[in-house]
């Protein structure tokens, strides 16, 4: 199909004799599936959430060097600088924002606390 054929089908006709209302076909486009993190799937118990918040806040205040091991095995070393419900920000060689759902486990640098 040439570009002229495409343009002529898009451009309105200039002659009123040939003008006719164009009906647009409504295509049924499916809505994109919503993306949900595993942390969203079920609400955490309040006690678990409070323990997590306390632990993270303590590590931030003491600037404890941490090792964060991700689900794919990658390790990120640094101090936790900031957190919210779904992410943590780690300051190491560079600043890294990590989704909590991607974290396998974390431990203090220098501890043999690996599972």
Image (cartoon, rainbow, N blue to C red):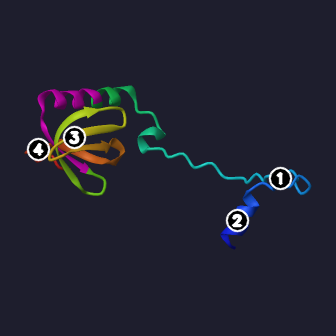
Indicate which label's residue lies in the foreground, 3 or 2.
2
Write the start and end of the magenta stretch as one range.
Answer: 53-69
SS assignment at label 4: loop
Cα distance in 3D space between marks 3 and 1: 56 Å
The residue identified by callout 1 is 22
Q: In which quarter of the image is residue 79?
A: top left
SS assignment at label 1: loop
Residue sticking out furthest to the right: 17
Cα distance in 3D space between marks 4 and 3: 13 Å
The residue identified by callout 4 is 109
For marks 1 and 2 on the same chain, the one whose residue lies earlier in the sequence: 2
**Of 28 and 48, the residue lying toward us:** 28
Cα distance in 3D space between marks 4 and 1: 68 Å
Q: Residues within 10 Å of mark 4 (few under 14, many from 20)?
A: some
Please give left or right for residue 58 compared with residue 1 in the image: left
The residue identified by callout 3 is 90
Q: Residues within 10 Å of mark 2 (few under 14, many from 20)?
A: few
Estimate the x, y position of residue 56 in percent, counting from the top left.
Answer: 23, 31
Residue 64 shown in magenta: yes
For marks 4 and 1 on the same chain, the one whose residue lies earlier in the sequence: 1
Where 7 sits versus 83, above or below? below
**Of 5 and 65, the residue lying toward us:** 5
Estimate the x, y position of residue 23 in percent, counting from the top left.
Answer: 83, 52
Q: Which residue is drawn at 14% across and 47% down?
A: 93
Q: Are marks 1 and 2 in contact (CB under 8 Å)?
A: no
Please give left or right for residue 59 compared with residue 50 in the image: left
Q: Residue at x 43, y 44 (%)?
A: 38
Cα distance in 3D space between marks 3 and 2: 52 Å
């Amino acid at each position: 199909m040439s570009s002229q054929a495409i343009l002529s089908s898009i451009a309105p006709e200039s002659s009123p004799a040939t003008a006719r209302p164009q009906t647009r076909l409504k295509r049924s486009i499916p809505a994109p599936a919503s993306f949900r993190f595993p942390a969203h799937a079920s609400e955490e118990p309040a006690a678990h959430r409070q323990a997590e918040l306390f632990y993270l806040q303590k590590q931030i205040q003491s600037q404890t060097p941490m090792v964060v091991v991700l689900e794919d095995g990658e390790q990120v070393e640094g101090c936790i600088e900031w957190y919210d419900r779904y992410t943590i920000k780690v300051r190491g060689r560079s600043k890294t924002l990590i989704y909590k759902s991607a974290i396998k486990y974390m431990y203090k640098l220098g501890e043999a606390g690996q599972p």
